[in-house]
Image (tube, helix red, strand yellow):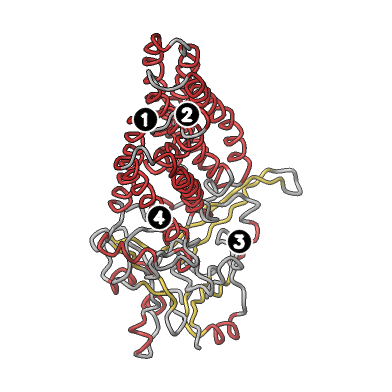
Amino acid sequence: MTKYGFYFDSSCCSGCKTCQVACKDKNDLTEGIRFRRVYEVCGSAWEKDSKGTWVPDIVAYNLSVACNHCENPSCVAACPTKAMHIGNDGIVLVDPDKCVGCRYCEWACPYGAPQYNPQKGIMQKCDFCSDYIKEGKKPVCVTSCLMRALDFDTLENLESHYGANRDVFPLPHSGQTGPAVIIKAHPGAAKAKELKASIINREEVRNDR
Amino acid sequence: MAMQLSAGIILIYDLFLLSPLYRTRVDIPARFQWILMIALTAALVGVAFSLMHLGNPGNATRTLANLHSSWLSREIFSVLAYTLLLAVVTILHFTMPSAARSLKWMVDFTAISGIVLVFIMSRIYMIPTRPAWNSVFTPLGFYLAAIILGSSLLLIFQINHGSWASQKLLAILSFSIPLIQLAILPVFMAWLGQKDLVSGNALAIILDNHMAAFYLRLGFFILAIGFGIWAFFSIRSDTLRNHLLFTPAILAWAAILAAQIIDRYLFYAQNLPAEGF
C-alpha cells in the first residue's frame, strides 16, 4: 500500500500562512476551521557572554501543521462510531454519514487536526487533497507555499530525499502515533526547550467553536 | 454528573439501606421506590444531556460501533446497560414491593454496573493529550462525587423513617467525603504545578481566571462539612425528634450539590491540550 506524507522545512518557513489560507479556500472552510495551522514558536533567555555581558538569546520559528495521517492514529482509536477511519491508501478520513459530532477525536489527536464544523454538526479534517492526488497533483498547501517549505510524496520518496526526522519541539514525540510527516527542524529548535519556548499564537490557531 | 448522582444513589442504597440495617422489615418501604425513581430520572437526564451535546444526534445509534478501542463507545454501552438495569429494578420495586427484597441481587448487579460506569466515564478524560486530566485524581474525583451525591440525598430520605444507624452512617459520609475532597485539593494542585508545563498552565488558568469559582468551591466544601457535622449531631434515637435532622440534611445536600457543580466547572476549565495543540 502506498503511504503518503508531508515534508515540512521549518528552517525556511516564513510564517506567511499562505498554506493555511489556500487550504481554507480550496476546502471552502468557514471562519474558525483550519485544516492546516501555522504555529509560531518563540522563546528567549538572557545569557552571559565571555566578556561578562548579559545578552539576549532568542529562538523563533514556525511550524505548519495539518493532519499527519498517522500510522497509529489516536483519533481513529477514540472515535465511537468508526467515522474516523484509515482509507485504502493510508489516508485518515472522516465519514460524514457516520460522524456523530462528539468531538472526542479532537481531544484525542495530539496535533489538533480534526476540526468541528458547527454548521454541519460533524468533524472535518485534511484529506491530503485526495481529489488532487487522484488527478496526479499535490495538495494545495504544498503548491501554494511561497518558500517551498512544504512538499508531498510517498513516505518512501520523502525519506530518501529529506531523511527520516519526524520530531521537532514542541510537537509530541513521533513514537506516540507514527505521523506521516518528515521535518527539517529550524536550527534554533534544538535549544527551544531549554529557552522555554512556547506557541505564541494560540488564540489564533485554536479551534474553540 | 447526573449519571454519578444516579450511580451514587444506587450504590449507597444497595450498601447501606438494603442490608442488615433493615433486615427486620419484610417489605421495601415506599420511599425506597422513590429513591430508585430519582436515580432513574437522574440517569435519563444524563442520557438526554449526552445526546444534546452531540453535533449530529441522528447518528447516535452508531456510537456503539467501536467498543474495541473507544472509551466513549464503552461509556455509551455502560450507560445504556446501567439505565436499562435500573429501569427494570425500579419497575419491580413499584409493581412487586413485597418481592423486591428477594431481588436484592438485581440491585447488587445494578450497583456494580454503576461502579463500572463511573470508572469508564472517568477513563474518557484520561488521555495523554489532556495532561491535567490524565491521572488517578480523575477517577478518584468521579467516585467521591458519586458517593457524596448519593449519600447526602439518601440522608434526606432517611429523616423520620430511617434507622438511627443508617442515619448516622449517611451523615458521617456527608461530611467525611467533602473533608477528603478538601484534603486532596492541595495535593492535586501541587501535582498539577510540578507535573509538566501544560498541567502548570491548567493550574495557572484556575488561579488566574477562575479564582472566584475556586474560592466558592472551597466555601461550599467547608459549608458541606459543617452542615454534615450538624446533621450528625442532630440525629436522635428518639424518632419523635427526627425533625431536628431536616434542616442540616437539606443544607448539607444543597452545599454538596453546589460544590460538585463548581468542581465539575473547574475540571472542564483544565481542558488544555498537550504541547498547545
Front label number (3 vs 4): 4
Front label number (2 vs 4): 2
Instruction: Residue B59: name its quadrant.
Output: bottom left
* Residue A80: x %, y % from top left: 41, 64
**Looking at the image, residue A136 lies above or below residue A68:** below
Mark number displayed over residue B29: 1
Question: Local crowd at mark 2 within 10 Å, few (<14), some, or many (≥20)?
Answer: some
- Mark 1 — on which chain does it sit? B
Q: Quarter holding the N terminus of chain B?
A: top left
Residue at 44%, 77% in the rendered image: A86
Q: Amino acid at mark 1?
A: Pro
Q: CA distance from mark 2 to mark 3?
A: 68 Å
To the question of a shared chain for discs 1 and 3, the answer is no
Q: Amino acid at mark 4?
A: Ala
Q: CA distance from mark 3 to mark 4?
A: 50 Å
**CB under 8 Å between callouts 2 and 3?**
no
- Which residue corresponds to mark 2? B22
